[in-house]
Image (cartoon, coloured by chain):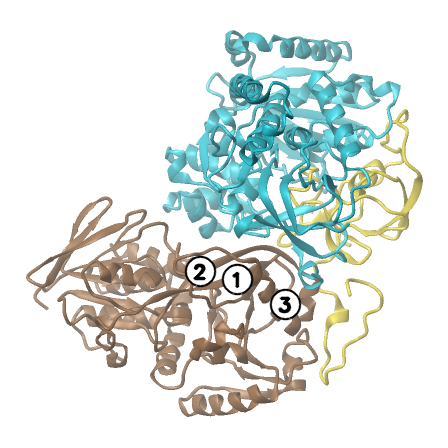
């Protein structure tokens, strides 16, 4: 690094941007976070709160998630906002024989990765979740899975960063990135120019628009996920859960187009059930569709019949930053010095934010990150287009 | 039922108004007179019942606020169906109304280990 | 009731604006569907007493109400027996709520909100008229969540629609012109009025006299009510604010205090009024949730009652084919709603080309004359609305002064203290504050606390309305049982 104390500008006030700001500020770095709207107003404020290990691909992806998980307990104590982290344990619901076979292989590989996960038969599943449909076959279960309040998580990171003198500037839109001799020198915004030695692109589903500003094209695409919210009720779910179809769809987008996206369910601290989701490529459209809402309700109620007594009070939709290989882009961009990517987590941003923040901060400050991030290098996509 | 409902002896119906047919409702197990054309809320108020529910977090008693289907403060259980707005629901003969319903999920949807489900006993939605 | 798949026009809300629009559209061979969530047509203005009685004579309707009753009769007549999906003409669907408007003007309707057995339908319309009306505005005080504390509207509905007193005795407070009407109705029907505590000081009222112009009949009406109450020896005070509603499990008394010229409470002037119920209101806010869900643009105008739907001279919103009429384009009372209902009806007839069929005597020119007349009337009523809204307005300082232990969001039980703290931490927008505190995330989706929180943020931060924003709405805009989706 040329500067002993570089000024680092982070674009994006979601969980990823605020996590990086938090870890940088903790190490006394000079950091300014710029957010176009409110904190957590993008994907981080429009998603479920699953911190799910079982949905991660065995390998580096799962390892990263497991490291991230360890940080959540500390964050619950460390951050000045209650992030409502609960290690409830999680289930992947198995509905048919084919899924059963697939999940056997999937969980075996995860076990090799060191994940505490096991298969439950129908009786064991109902012992844990008595409201689940009698028609299910079973589930895979990991005591490690949990949930968090993603909005509070982003707010918590941001407030902690502010305490350590990070500047958090909201309602300010980045309109251009200044470069000189092939290195970044700052960002132009709707509130003027901010000089910086490094610019971190943590703009989530908008990240490709930011990198386009410097003529670098990355295949990060917004993928819409709709969520249905019920009224706050007494507990009917102890664990957070997804269906085995969700895992299949996540790693094979062609399945999603056939309406086989699977579902996710969690009951928040407040008692609301968050029911998801869809995976749709519709540009930056964040509307809820009648078809999407109906599909989610039909599929979740089939697995959790008690939902018939619940009322829907609202819906929302968020854009997940999709990448073709399901892995985020973390690290410097070769062709422009000082321009660093930290985006493309799709549905894993919440779960991966603590470790992403820590590793990215280390990398930015010139320390060797505790986990090798080569597999996430943006180079694998640079200028290959979407 | 968390709170006991307040009762007054006098009916709050204005005497001179001509009303629909007299019917009987069951409110928290007790008979309450109502007239066709009234809402559940009007019938309850007329017999002196102000407390319709309790809040979920601090268990504070709540009654009607807006009277026009907007505030959701008047939710009662009607014929086994929870969370019905008293202000928007017309009375029907023999309606079974529970004020201050518990926020517990219905036990008839619990699956016991082994997969049997307790049969739905005619209460609640099917 | 079976619905058609497609309608020429769907009208959401059968109050003054919706009825007037339906009336204007009738007789043109159009398939029109009118939807209302209430048990009867007529909206909030003409809450009708099912059967007349002598003692209810103070409820004798004024000119506008007479018009309303006549329209309601006409709508009921026009739609009677029109149940079959094959019938041409006008259909009326009551006890039904519109949960959302999706692309290509597809409306998701819950047929009978009382019966979960009936499912949802979605129907498509070439033109949608949104006439969703208004609700009351509140100034929260400690204990406003006690049973027995209700809106003036709730008390009026009990009296007018059901002939039921809210309680043996009722205290009336706030700034709304409904106060006097309700007091008179209570007194004439065997109820007692513990007191009428008008928040608006006499000085403010007098300052408005020059602006009243041709609206002086309203003044006469007010005088009539005042006289009635004086005769009944009802304690009446002006420039008095409710400080607290007290009681255990139900209201037993109300504490009120005088306000100074700036509108702040004068300490030491607190008086306790024993009472069994409290009816209060502080003016009105437009019900913009459904139009916002549909994607209609909004504007903030305090003279119009806050965030209102943006319309052009044809009352078309920013969403093509979606029109807005009545209180949602600006709070101004029944007459403006009536005028806008007619106006929106004409706009749609003109757009469809149905005016050529000689329906208005004198053809196109007569149509243009009528159109211009309505535009003029509308502007005139807007002026009256501005006066009404200003008269009902509570000084912003009253919102900043709400004590920290007062509940603001009743659904999620969020207090003023939590809101003040988060605002201080920089959450100064409707969206930001919602995320930080959960206010407005409950069952009512911010319909009750939203306008209150807007005023609180304005008072605490002095930002402009555009910066503070408004609550975004998603379908379903009203709570709906999952079963309804599963059965459809």
Residue at the (33%, 69%) spot, across then down = A344
Q: Is residue A225 above or below residue A250?
A: above
Nearer to us of marks 1 and 3 is 3
Q: CA distance from mark 3 to mark 2?
A: 20 Å
Which colour represents chain B?
Answer: yellow
Residue at the (28%, 72%) spot, across then down = A329
The chain coloured cyan in the image? C
- Between C289 and C376, which is closer to the camera in this rendering? C376
Q: Which comes before the other along the chain, label 3 or label 2? A: 3
Which class describes the residues within 10 Å of circle 2: few (<14), some (14-19), or many (20+)? many
Residue with the mark numbered 2: A318
- Between C446 and A361, which is closer to the camera in this rendering? C446
Q: Which comes before the other along the chain, label 1 or label 3? A: 1
Residue C256 at x, y = what percent? 61, 25
- Between A344 and B50, which is closer to the camera in this rendering? A344
- Between C484 and A120, which is closer to the camera in this rendering? C484
Secondary structure under tag 1 reads strand
Image position of A178 (left or right of A327):
left
Q: Chain of mark 2?
A: A
Look at the numbered discs 1 and 2 and tell me whether their residues touch, using CB distance below 8 Å. Answer: yes
Residue C185 at x, y = what percent? 77, 21
Residue with the mark numbered 1: A227
Residue C294 at x, y = what percent? 52, 46
């Amino acid at each position: 690094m040329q500067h002993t104390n570089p000024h680092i500008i982070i674009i994006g006030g979601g969980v990823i941007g605020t996590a990086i700001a938090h870890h940088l500020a903790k190490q006394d770095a000079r950091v300014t976070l710029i957010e176009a709207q409110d904190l957590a107003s993008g994907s981080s404020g429009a998603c479920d709160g699953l911190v799910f290990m079982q949905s991660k691909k065995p390998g580096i992806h799962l390892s990263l998630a497991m490291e991230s998980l360890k940080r959540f307990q500390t964050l619950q104590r460390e951050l000045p906002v209650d992030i409502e982290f609960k290690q409830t344990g999680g289930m992947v619901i198995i509905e048919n024989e084919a899924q059963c076979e697939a999940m056997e292989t999937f969980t075996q590989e995860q076990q090799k990765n060191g994940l505490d996960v096991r298969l439950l038969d129908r009786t064991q599943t109902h012992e844990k979740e008595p409201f689940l449909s009698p028609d299910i076959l079973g589930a895979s279960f990991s005591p490690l899975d949990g949930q968090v309040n993603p909005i509070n998580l982003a707010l918590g990171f941001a407030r902690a960063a502010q305490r350590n003198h990070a500047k958090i500037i909201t309602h300010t839109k980045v309109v251009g990135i200044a470069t000189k001799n092939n290195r970044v020198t700052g960002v132009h915004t709707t509130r003027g120019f901010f000089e910086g030695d490094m610019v971190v692109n943590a703009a989530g589903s908008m990240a490709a628009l930011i990198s386009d500003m410097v003529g670098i094209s990355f295949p990060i695409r917004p993928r819409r996920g709709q969520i249905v919210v019920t009224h706050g009720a007494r507990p009917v779910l102890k664990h957070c859960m997804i269906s085995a179809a969700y895992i299949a769809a996540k790693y094979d987008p062609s399945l999603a187009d056939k309406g086989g996206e699977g579902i996710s369910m969690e009951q928040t601290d407040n008692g609301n059930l968050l029911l998801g989701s869809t995976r749709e490529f519709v540009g930056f459209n964040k509307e809820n569709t009648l078809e999407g809402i109906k599909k989610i309700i039909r599929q979740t109620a089939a697995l959790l019949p008690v939902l018939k007594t619940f009322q829907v009070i609202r819906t929302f939709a968020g854009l997940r930053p999709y990448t073709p290989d399901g892995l985020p882009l973390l690290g410097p961009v070769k062709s422009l010095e000082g321009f660093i990517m930290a985006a493309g987590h799709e549905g894993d941003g919440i779960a991966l934010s603590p470790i992403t923040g820590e590793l990215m901060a280390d990398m930015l400050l010139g320390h060797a990150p505790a986990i090798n991030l080569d597999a996430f290098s943006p180079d694998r996509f640079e200028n290959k287009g979407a | 039922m968390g709170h006991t409902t307040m009762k007054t002896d006098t009916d709050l119906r204005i005497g001179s108004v001509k009303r629909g047919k007299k019917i009987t409702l069951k409110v928290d197990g007790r008979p309450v007179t109502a007239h066709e054309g009234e809402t559940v809320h009007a019938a309850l108020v007329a017999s002196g019942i102000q407390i319709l529910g309790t809040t979920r977090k601090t268990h504070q008693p709540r009654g009607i606020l807006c009277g026009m289907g907007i505030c959701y403060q008047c939710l009662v259980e009607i014929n086994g169906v929870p969370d019905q707005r008293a202000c928007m629901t017309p009375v029907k003969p023999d309606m079974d109304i529970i004020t201050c319903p518990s926020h517990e999920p219905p036990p008839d949807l619990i699956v016991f280990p082994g997969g049997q489900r307790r049969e739905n006993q005619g209460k609640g939605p099917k | 009731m079976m619905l058609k798949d497609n309608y020429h026009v769907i009208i959401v809300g059968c109050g003054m604006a919706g009825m007037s629009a339906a009336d204007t559209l009738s007789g043109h061979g159009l398939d029109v569907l009118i939807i209302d969530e209430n048990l009867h047509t007529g909206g909030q203005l003409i809450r009708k007493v099912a059967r007349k009685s002598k003692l209810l004579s103070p409820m004798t309707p004024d000119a506008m109400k007479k018009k309303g009753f006549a329209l309601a009769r006409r709508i009921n007549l026009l739609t009677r027996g029109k149940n079959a999906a094959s019938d041409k003409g006008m259909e009326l669907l009551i006890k039904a709520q519109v949960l959302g408007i999706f692309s290509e003007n597809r409306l998701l309707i819950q047929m009978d909100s009382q019966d979960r057995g009936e499912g949802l339908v979605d129907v498509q319309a070439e033109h949608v008229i949104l006439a969703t009306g208004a609700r009351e505005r509140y100034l929260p005080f400690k204990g406003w969540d006690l049973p027995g504390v209700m809106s003036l509207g709730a008390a009026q509905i009990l009296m007018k629609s059901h002939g039921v007193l809210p309680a043996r005795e009722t205290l009336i407070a706030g700034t709304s012109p409904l106060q006097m009407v309700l007091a008179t109705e209570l007194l004439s029907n065997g109820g007692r009025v513990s007191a009428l505590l008008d928040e608006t000081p006499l000085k403010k009222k007098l300052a408005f006299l020059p602006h009243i112009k041709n609206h002086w009949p309203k003044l006469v009406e007010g005088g009539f009510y005042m006289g009635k109450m004086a005769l009944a020896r009802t304690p009446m005070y002006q420039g008095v604010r409710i400080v607290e509603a007290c009681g255990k499990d139900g209201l037993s008394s109300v504490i009120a205090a005088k306000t100074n010229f700036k509108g702040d409470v004068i300490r030491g002037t607190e008086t306790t009024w024993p009472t069994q119920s409290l009816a209060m209101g502080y003016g009105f806010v437009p019900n913009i949730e459904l139009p916002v869900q549909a994607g209609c643009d909004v504007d903030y105008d305090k003279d119009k009652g806050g965030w209102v739907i943006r319309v052009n001279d044809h009352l078309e919103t920013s969403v093509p084919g979606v029109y807005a009429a009545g209180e949602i384009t600006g709070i101004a009372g029944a007459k403006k709603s009536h005028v806008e209902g007619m106006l929106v009806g004409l706009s749609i007839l003109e757009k469809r080309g149905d005016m050529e069929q000689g329906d208005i005597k004198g053809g196109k020119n007569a149509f243009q004359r009528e159109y211009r007349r309505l535009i003029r009337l509308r502007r005139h009523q807007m002026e009256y609305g501005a006066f009404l809204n200003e008269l009902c307005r509570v000084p912003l300082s009253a919102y900043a002064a709400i004590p920290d232990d007062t509940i603001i969001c009743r659904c999620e039980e969020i207090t003023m203290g939590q809101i003040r703290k988060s605002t201080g931490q920089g959450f100064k927008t409707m969206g930001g504050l919602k995320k930080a505190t959960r206010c407005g995330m409950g069952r009512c989706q911010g319909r009750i606390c939203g306008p209150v929180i807007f005023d609180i943020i304005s008072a605490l931060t002095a930002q402009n309305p555009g910066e503070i924003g408004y609550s975004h709405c998603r379908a379903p805009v009203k709570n709906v049982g999952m079963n309804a989706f599963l059965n459809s």
